[in-house]
Image (cartoon, rainbow, N blue to C red):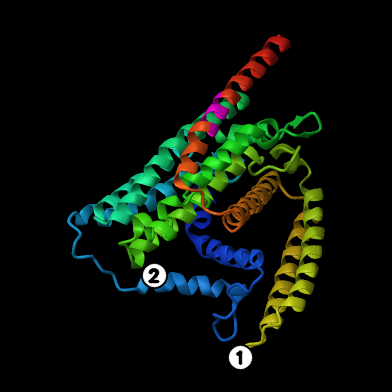
Amino acid sequence: MNTVLILLPLVLTILYSLATVPILVWMERRIAGLIQDRLGPNRCHIKGVRLGGIIQSIADMMKLVFKEEFLPSHIKNKFYYLVAPSIAFMSAFLTFMVIPYADTITLGEQTYSMQALPTDLGVLWFLAFAGLGVYGIILGGWASHNKYAILGAMRATAQVIGYEVAMGLSLVSMLITYGTISLNEMVSYQTQSFFIIPAWGIFIQPIATIIFIVTAFAETNRTPFDAAEGESEIVAGYHTEYGAMKFGLFFVAEYIAMAASGALIVTLFLGGYQLPYLNTADLVNNFELLLWGIIIFALVTSVLFLKWMQKHNIFAMSGINETKLYTTLIIGFTVFAVILMSYYALANSSQSAKEIGVMLLQFAIFTVKLFFLHFVFIWVRWTLPRFRYDQTQKLGWNILLPLSLVNIFITAVVVVAGVNYGN
């Protein structure tokens, strides 16, 4: 058990970053199809099994893995050309290492942190590697010896410089509000209430929330801040000369960076792995009641999803009956989960069992919030057009930077006034 709990945060980091990329690509296509009122990925299948279109994403990943590698003959700095995608990829991946997925768990005399890298300097770690990722883009654009790639690298550099400052200043106001730089303590702070609403960062610091979310879009080169790879102007920008898995690393790095930014937004502004008004101790003390609520939610959700699927999954393909297969699997999984949770609810579970159960619940809460942020990132991409390069710079320097400075001043005044009033 000790080994499992020590390795669990690292496994979750891999799952939330690397393993979710095919799912994010699938979400991108499905949501784009929904917004544009057209079909998304719906034909790629294995013996009639489409998994809602996710087979298309898996096929794309396999295509990149097995595609022939090439090295343009005009490349002079081959080392920098080859290492650039790895820098972008590793920087995006390492930003995930400090995200807390659940509260610290204590079993016996041993305490386990649910961070892959248990440190109180998580905010600084995130900023460091989020800024380091642009070095991969700069190197890739410069080493490509292509005018479009160099233009894309220059745009990305200017964008990161402009928005990194505003992002850091928005975090300063959050540090003043929470009074700590520990991400776990920030999540604990948000279990309180602010008048009658949860003390989530989005409610107590709405300006900082907006600034951070906008800068997160810019830092990850997501639309409408994707001028660094604007295909209508500079072909593909910094990765014009890349193909196969070298391009694949840039591609995956963007989604991992998006996921990491979403995870930090969840942690700082949406209560992290906690439910509103409830801290970990409350969840442990009311574990049985909580389980019954989850059981009811699981039953209702399964019934509604089955009805929706049987109504909409009517695209006929050769092979097995896909809807029947999914119905059987969902019913079987739901029955198994309900029986297991009912056993734990009826049995007099030990304190350790309750803490592990709450830890699993917090994983689920964090996952739901994170995928909601993924939906927001994709929704914005397929709703707003790309900003012009000058518009991007004006927004960062003329609007977000002064606004973040004003927000720090207001936050400091309110915190100091509150401390003096309390004394």
Above or below — where is 113 with respect to 16? above
Magenta stretch encompasses residue 400: yes
The local crowd at label 2, few if under 14, some if 14 to 19, many if 20 or more residues have their Cα within 10 Å, is: some
Q: Which comes before the other along the chain, label 2 or label 1? A: 2
Nearer the observer, 359 or 353? 359
| Amino acid carrying mark 2 in the image | Leu
Q: Is residue 10 visible?
A: no
Residue found at x 64% / y 14%: 416
User: Which is more toward the observer, 203 or 285?
Assistant: 203
On the image, the x and y values in percent for residue 14 come to 48, 55
Is label 1 in a helix, a strand or a loop? loop
Q: Quadrant of the C terminus?
A: top right
Residue under label 1: 318
Whether residue 300 appears in this view of the structure is: yes
Q: In this orientation, which residue lies closer to the viewer: 367 or 205?
A: 205
Q: CA distance from mark 2 to mark 1?
A: 27 Å
On residue 64, the disc is: 2
SS of the residue under disc 2: helix
Residue 357 x %, y %: 68, 50
Residue 258 in the image: state x and y as whole percent: 51, 51
Q: Quadrant of residue 276?
A: top right
